[in-house]
């Protein structure tokens, strides 16, 4: 009986400590030339999109 309770308590700890963290990859591609331009990694929110946009602006200013 003690072993069964310990096993259940151990399983509860494992199940509650598992969390999923997702990372989205935003990719900018030249559709006409079919070339990779730049990318940004982060959440699905607008912050990551803005980071990619800033990278694209910097890339455009260099040319």
Image (cartoon, helix red, strand yellow):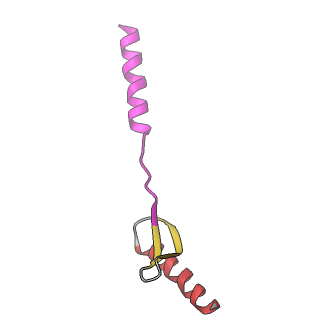
Residue drawn at x 53%, y 83% as measured from the top left:
56
Seen at 49% across and 82% down, the residue is: 53
Say if the magenta span includes residue 20. Answer: yes
Q: Quadrant of residue 45?
A: bottom left
Q: How many numbered tags mark residues here?
A: 0
Q: Nearer the viewer, residue 30 or 5?
A: 30
Q: Name the residue: 40% across, 10% down.
A: 3
The residue furthest right is 62
Answer whether residue 27 is magenta in the image. no
Q: Is residue 8 left or right of residue 53?
A: left
46 in relation to 14, above or below = below
**Whole-percent x, y for residue 52 in the image:** 50, 77
Measuring from the top left, give residue 43's x and y in whole percent: 44, 64
Measured as percent of width and height from the top left, residue 18 is found at 42, 40
Taking the image as shown, residue 54 lies to the left or right of residue 44, namely right
Is residue 23 or residue 60 the one in the foreground?
A: 60
Q: Quadrant of the C terminus?
A: bottom right
Q: Position of residue 49 (x, y in %)?
A: 45, 76
What residue range appears in magenta? Answer: 1-25
Per the picture, the main secondary structure of the magenta-coloured stretch is: helix
For the N terminus, give its image quadrant: top left
Q: Residue at x 42, y 80 (%)?
A: 31
Please tell me in which quadrant of the rendered image residue 62 appears.
Answer: bottom right
């Amino acid at each position: 009986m003690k072993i069964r309770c310990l096993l259940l308590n151990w399983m509860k700890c494992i199940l509650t400590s598992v969390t999923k963290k997702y990372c989205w990859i935003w990719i900018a591609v030249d559709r006409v030339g079919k070339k990779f331009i730049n990318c940004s990694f982060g959440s699905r929110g607008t912050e990551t999109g803005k980071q990619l946009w800033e990278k694209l602006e910097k890339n455009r200013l260099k040319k």
